[in-house]
Image (cartoon, grey):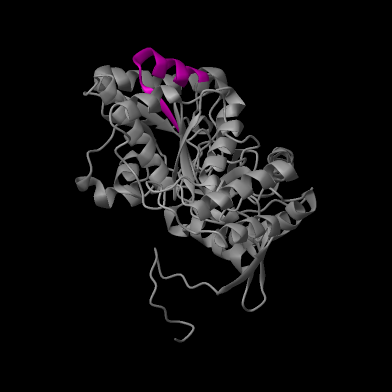
Amino acid sequence: MSDDSSYLFYQSRNPRPFLDYGEGIYLFDEAGNRYIDGSSGAMVSNIGHSNPRVLAKIKAQMDKATFGYRLHFRTHPSEDLAAKTVAMTPDGLDRVFFVSGGSEAVESAVKLARQFALTQGQDARHKVISRFPSYHGCTFGALDLTGYDPLREPFAPMMEGMPKVAAPATYLDRDNLSEEARGIKYADLLRDKILAEGPETVLAFIMEPVGGASTGALVAPDSYYGRIREICDEFGVLLIYDEVMTGAGRTGKFLAAEHWGITPDIVAMSKGFGAGYAPLGAIVAGARLVEPVLDAGGFLHGFTYAGNPLACSAGLAVLEEMDDQGMIENAARMGEVLMVQLRALMDRYPFIGDVRGKGLLTAFEFVSDRETMEPLPPELDAHARLVELAYERGLIIYSRRTRGGMTGDHFLIAPPLIITEQQIDELMVILRDALDAFAQDAGLPVEAAK
């Protein structure tokens, strides 16, 4: 087969070189070019690439058994990973169900919520409120919860259309409210929506505690999180945290929920949970939800690879390595270093309108005008162009359209949790060079260094 042909297809025709190997925060193609993995792939490779201790533990499990169906055998890797996961999550989250990815985790969380409601005689509860913009996955159930028009609209006639409330994008607000008041204002949109839909019909509210691909590391005001918990409790609505991207240490805590002292009813995790070493995800919930479902005949759900011993051995090794190497604490420290450097970009590039995030989940957003926060013209295709310019220079970053997927441009900088201050400096040199090239191509101003 020639270099420019392939039998594979994915989202688009965007040729890339063949990957050779990874090491730490770096990836190398077959031509010997090196890339800084500035987005951990798709915010997956939390512990870096080719960790030898993790690989050794996976190999040890491979030598024993690669598959044992959960209806036929218990396995030590799945039991041990479940225990480790519970030990690392807030009190009250003590039951684990394994899956292979983020979309599966979200759908599992929703199906557990629905089956719990049925055990309580609340058959009318079926609506899951989510936010716009948001991203919760690409399977039909998860996509119906997603607020990102380009991905959802082609399939909208095939879905019920779950209700949405506005994401707390307070950086766009031009009012006289404090951040605390804005947080309450956005949270109360949920209360209004529950009342409008009929509280007896609302099953759950699902949210990303720190925004992912659709909102670019959006962090709500602190007041938002507690108020959301209060509203859910008021109406008996289950609170689901989609921590597929934020979980497993990404924000400087094992779960982002810990930053605000919130215990969700159900947590969905994936991505960094297996850190790219195996397809792996999980939902974590409390016994108060799970036990009634099991008593009523069992959880009517499952995947062939749920609890796969090879995947679970990888996940257990990943979490142990996070602990042993202090990676979550490093994410908190290096996140502060990275945030300082990203915010400094605003002095040089007037078209950067906002920098945000928590830990090593950070982002910056392009605008035409910082006063109005008007996006750049869509025809500039800025979100794709900067990614290409950075890639050509040996830096991988991740971008999406910010304002519901149709306009706006944000860029996620989310390197592996093992990154050092020196490597952040190296990343920033390449990023600034790519920004200079983009500004020149787009005819946008650049301020002289002070």
Place of residue 450 in the rendered image (x, y in percent of width and height, measured from the top left): 79, 47
Task: From this view, report whether residue 53 is shown above or below residue 338.
Answer: below
In this rendering, position of residue 339 left or right of residue 277: right
The span shown in magenta is 226-241
Place of residue 232 in the rendered image (x, y in percent of width and height, measured from the top left): 40, 19
Count the marks: how many? 0
Place of residue 141 in the rendered image (x, y in percent of width and height, measured from the top left): 30, 43
Question: Which residue is painted at 52% across and 43% down in the image?
Answer: 245
In this rendering, position of residue 300 left or right of residue 446: left
Place of residue 102 in the rendered image (x, y in percent of width and height, measured from the top left): 44, 46
Give yes or no for residue 229 being in the magenta stretch.
yes
Main structural element of the magenta stretch: helix, strand or loop? helix
The one of 196 and 247 positioned closer to us in this rendering: 247
Give yes or no for residue 210 being in the magenta stretch.
no
Whether residue 328 is visible: yes
In this rendering, position of residue 191 left or right of residue 396: left
The one of 366 and 41 positioned closer to us in this rendering: 41
The one of 405 and 75 positioned closer to us in this rendering: 75
The N terminus sits in image quarter: bottom left
Task: From this view, report whether residue 261 is shown above or below residue 101.
Answer: above
Residue 432 quadrant: bottom right
Task: From this view, report whether residue 274 is shown above or below residue 109.
Answer: below
Question: Which residue is painted at 61% across and 69% down in the image?
Answer: 392
Whether residue 367 is visible: no
As drawn, the residue found furthest toward the top would be 234
